[in-house]
Amino acid sequence: MKIKLCVCILLSGILLGCGTVADKTFSKVTIDGPYKYKVDSVMKLMTLDEKIGQMNQYSSDVSATGVMTADNTKLQQIEEGKVGSMLNVVGALNTRKYQEAAMKSRLHIPLIFGLDVIHGMVTNYPIPLAEAASFDLDLMRRTAAGAAKEASSMGIHWTFAPMVDVSRDARWGRSMEGAGEDTWYGCQVAKARVSGFQGKSLYDKNTILACAKHFAAYGACIAGKDYNTVDMSRLELQNVYLPPFKAACDAGVATFMNAFNDFDGVPATANTYLQRTIQKGLWHFSGFTVSDWGSIGQMIAHGYAADMKDAGCKAISGGCDMDMESRAYLSYMKELIKEKKVKEKYVDDAVRRILLKKFELGLFDDPYRYCDEQNEKKTVLSGELRNLSREAGKKSIVLLKNTNHVLPLSNPTSIALVGPLCKSKDDMRGGWFGIGTIDGVVTINEGLKKKFPYAQVNYAEGYDINTNELKEDSALLAAKKSDVVIVCVGERIFQSGENRSKAHIDLPSTQQQLVKDLKSTGKKVIVLLCGGRPLIFNELTPSADAILMTWWLGTEAGNAIADVVSGDYNPSAKLPITFPFTVGQCPIYYNYKSTGHPAKDGAPYTTGYMDQTFQPAYPFGFGLSYTTFDISAPVTDKIQYKMNEPINCKVKITNTGNRIGKETVQLYIKDKVASITRPIKELKGFQQVQLNPGETKEVVLVLNSSDLGFFNGEGQYIVEPGNFDIMVGNSSQNLKGITINLRKE
Ligand code: BGC
């Protein structure tokens, strides 16, 4: 029998109605350090109205990322101390104008300017899902730092990123904003991105507040429909969806954003269990939590609040500190306190949290320290940031197929370049591009022409970018007169992202037909696939000699793609999310559970489909290189381990091809028998290794026994003794294993 060894605090939630939230779920923020007295000294001067003002956030009247209430009085309201933060106000000059208004308020409390800086500000990096494919955590830290540098030079103090939602359903358009389907990997990426945005000190003018969103379980919307209901066990919540948020919290994330969905029947925005019991209680989170856009008011549509006043009451009681664009707090909080429906200490706690961040940013020392036009000029789209974007771009491209080494191309004399995306600047930026430049984008056409200056590039549209209608004649002609065909197909910028859920994630049949017809010319066909999520393209696959998943790579997309096509960069990326074979498999992910009828295609009474394989088209962790690698079976230093003893797992990796290349060695575990059912495998480590042709290196991956644990039904994190498979390889489906035993003592 297994014994529970490591016991953490019980995660029991108590949910009561508005105004009756049990006090035991309330944890007042503890402020230590340099601002301990300063925050309270400001608090003492504040009227209740001024406190409520700090909890109110508006969008600018000119640009919005949701349904906005535009009024012409925002500047005036700021002067009256009714606004604590603005979003979508951008630029050193513009933010100064708003900050000047705040300085006219009675207490001169500065505003915080927030923006969705998701993958860059003006210089765009690959979309987060693409960048996660790089498996390069330091790169992700550096691009977040680059984004922070550019954003802060334009007056921004706060990004609504990283999105750390685990996404297992390709139909959900917001998969593009996160790190994919894996919880453990999601934790590593969350830490990297938070530390990139926030740096070592928020006082540093190049850093900004990060925001882990959407708290919580937003990615588990039923049927992949954005905003949809979430229905899951607390076991699933704790083991799969919460850990990346906890990792962000441990990395010191300054803020959280709650979510549009409900959990356990309570909208996340008012969910006491999520925000007070776990986040502010158990995790001792000392930052503040902002609502999602209008999510307080949306509780009326959820059928959870009777009206805006009730919604405001429930949101603050549930632990939501700042109201983004609902105006519930501003309109009703004072009344709610007077009527004793809301305790004033909730307001005080929220405001202390918000003021603390304003102090940490240095805004009380100088409210204009981020409004520096000179700095803005020299930072925006700088060579340094563009180089970083190109580096991130090439490291994010996944090689899915490469028959007979058709790639890389060495000195082609002529290329047929087909598909309107090859000349598109707009689409390369990818959704949630901040205020990303269009003019500055390097197209695929430009990138390839620069890379192959002596090649004749024969461009043809191939299909209509808006209707997908085929325009084949010129494309086939271009193919016939060229050495090789490069055809770009896939999604446009607005086809993945918020509110972009899809029931069909197959490429349009005309795009797939185009590839088939190009192949019928007898030429080698290289397919570049753009998009913000896993796509299905089985029809074109046999006609493609090579397939590169090129996502949306940002400002330097064309150069990054050319670097890979030419072989100047040997692709090293791996899929951070499963690519389904058919949409009916969604949600599909590698770390599913065995069930009592383990999946086996073709066998009766197994967990699968009678009309289709249960296997994906491309599994998590998959990605080819221009060279090949052999990874040996893992060897551990012994078979029997005691609790808390490190498990050293060694493999030998050899570059068996004839090019220098980088492989991502991945380590997975399986708990063979546990007190709850566990996944068939779980990623718990990886290492990237660069090898010359013929070179062999030993890689040591170290596991701790805590890596072998899980949350049980009572919310305790436990590690149980027993047998564990340790599996190592270069994708979730290409693994060799060994079994070890973990003893109780
Ligand atoms: C999105 C958030 C975003 C916010 C502000 C909402 O619609 O869900 O992720 O940060 O808008 O733009």
Image (spheres, grey):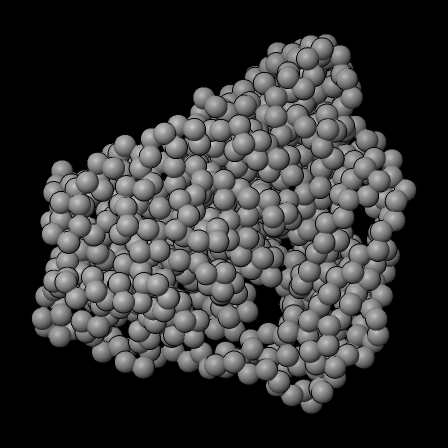
Q: Quadrant of the C terminus?
A: bottom right
Does 575 appear above or below 410?
below
Q: Is residue 384 above or below residue 718?
A: above
Q: 138 or 412, which is in the foreground?
A: 138
Q: Residue at x 64, y 16 (%)?
A: 449
Residue 265 placed where, x, y %?
36, 69
Quadrant in which the N terminus appears: bottom right
Query: Quick one: 228 or 8, which is closer to the camera?
Result: 8
Asked if residue 102 lies left or right of residue 723, the reply is left
Kindly identify the residue that appears in the image at 69 percent across and 30 percent down.
Answer: 564
The percent position of residue 662, horizontal first and vertical second, equals 76, 43
Identify the residue at the far right of this view: 694
Residue at 45% in and 78% down: 11
In this rendering, the answer to whether 429 lies above or below 248 is: above
Give the side of residue 279 with respect to residue 718, left or right: left
Taking depth in this image into account, of 611 and 653 the one nearest to the observer is 653
The answer to which quarter of the image holds residue 717 is bottom right
Q: How many numbered marks, from 0 up?
A: 0
Tell me, yes or no, if residue 290 can be seen here: no
Residue 500 image position (x, y, % from top left): 43, 43
Residue, x 58% and y 57% (percent of image)?
188
The answer to whether residue 238 of the structure is visible from this angle is yes
Horizontal side of 285 relative to 427 (left or right) equals left
Pick the residue in front: 21 or 136.
136
Residue 511 x, y percent position in the rendering: 59, 28
The answer to which quarter of the image holds residue 588 is bottom right
